Amino acid sequence: MIPECKSVGIAASRPCGDRVYFLTRYLLRPSGDSYDLLEVEPDPDAAGLMRPLRSERLLLTAGEVAVHPERVGLADRSGLVRLARGYGRPCTVFFGHDEHVTFVLDPEDEPLVTIHVHDIEPPRPSLAAACAGLEAAGLTGELGLVFEHHIRDIRDLGAGVYPCRAAGLARSLDRDGPAGGERVACCQTGRELLREAYGAEPELVETCPCGAVEAEPFVVRCCRAERTGLQTINGRFGVVVHWGASPLTILDALRALAVAWRDRA
């Protein structure tokens, strides 16, 4: 469980006596270098911002509560769970960059879904970079997602010609075309270009990240717009986004994947 910051308070002092803020559901009471965790219920029949308590219950003592020493982004729920699991205690308290506070209770019970990200380089593996950026911003943490990146370096393929000049390699289909006897690194689009523009059928090495899918759920990028969306590849379930998809489009695809994956469970 990870409560919203608005429901968590610090009980370092009680200037209003036994009254608490009306949204408060949990109190962290300082004890040594940690906190006791209390569950509280403000009186729902009372009025005003600060209300008397109907009930107060000690959930955990300070010895069961770890305190993460660094400020973190509290929106990254997946990140909080992973950090909390490392402490091996029932509860870990986290302070945000803005001094808000929350905690992770029973982190092993929090479900996380590992998304396998398939991409290639060079040039920049933009899908992997976008997923990392969304994760750092806390946007995928709300979905309970974590990522495992599989980035293939196409320079290791030993080809003489590569898909396009953007990769910065010596020879590319869109600039040079094939020469006799060269291996060409490309995907289905490259094969169509070879036939239409050059009338050539050289030895090919597949570069499409879709071909590397071996685990699920996955997210992969492809230059074929008709392939985008939720689908099964190599018997594995995931989502395909277009080669130039924006971070917002990728986030929407990940959200759809998270919902569909949990519906399959």
Image (cartoon, grey):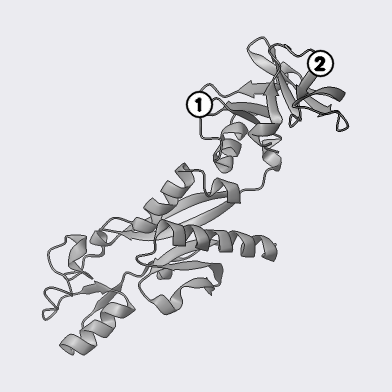
In primary-sequence order, the first of circles 2 and 1 is 2
The residue drawn where x is 69% and y is 36% is: 3
Vertical placement of 231 versus 101: above or below? below
Would you say residue 89 is visible in this rendering? no
Q: Is mark 2 on a helix, strand or loop?
A: loop
> Could you say whether the residue bearing mark 1 is in a helix, strand or loop?
loop
Q: Quadrant of residue 175?
A: bottom left
The quarter of the picture where the C terminus appears is bottom right
Q: In which quarter of the image is the N terminus?
A: top right
The number of numbered discs placed on residues in the rendered structure image is: 2
What label sits on residue 18 in the rendered view? Answer: 2
x then y, percent, for residue 13: 70, 11
Q: Is residue 247 above or below residue 175?
A: above
Q: Is residue 190 visible?
A: yes
Amino acid on which the number 1 mark rests in the picture: Arg
Residue 188 versus residue 182: which sits nearer the camera? 188
Left-right relation of 137 to 107: left
The residue to which callout 1 is attached is 71
Separation of residues labelled 2 and 1 (CA atoms): 29 Å
Residue 84 falls left or right of residue 204: right
Residue at position x 42%, y 56% in the image: 247
Badge 2 amino acid? Asp
